[in-house]
Image (spheres, rainbow, N blue to C red):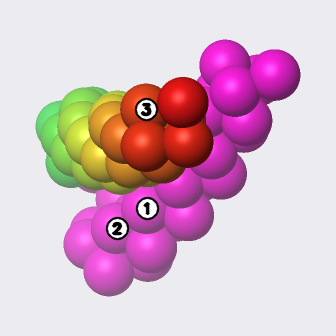
Amino acid sequence: MEIIKAFITYLVTYVITYYSIRYALADNILISTMNMAISALIAASITALLAVDLLRNNKNEA
């Protein structure tokens, strides 16, 4: 279940950061590629932080 939550968090974060960066910059192929890369990195790091926090909470409960 945690994997599904992490994946949904990743997708939501990716979409939010992608569109916020896309509207902030000009629409160019290079910039769009950069937007996707930056959005993926941000989404992956936020998901990793949430996963680490979840693992710590599970470890403390055990």
> Is 15 covered by the magenta stretch?
yes
Residue bearing mark 1:
17
x and y, in percent, of residue 3 in the image: 67, 19
Identify the amino acid type marked 1: Thr
Cβ atoms under marks 1 and 2 closer than 8 Å:
yes
Residue bearing mark 3:
59
Q: Main secondary structure of the magenta part?
A: helix
Q: SS for tag 2?
A: helix
Identify the amino acid type marked 3: Lys
Identify the amino acid type marked 2: Ile
Q: Residue at x 63, y 45 (%)?
A: 9
Crowd band around label 2 with a 10 angstrom C-alpha radius: few (<14), some (14–19), many (20+): some
Q: SS for tag 1?
A: helix
The residues tagged by marks 1 and 3 sit, at their Cα atoms, a distance apart of 31 Å
In magenta, the rendered stretch is: 1-29
Q: SS for tag 3?
A: helix
The vertical placement of 20 against 6, above or below, is: below
Task: Choose the circle earlier in sequence order: 3 or 2.
Answer: 2
Residue bearing mark 2:
21
The vertical placement of 27 against 54, above or below, is: below
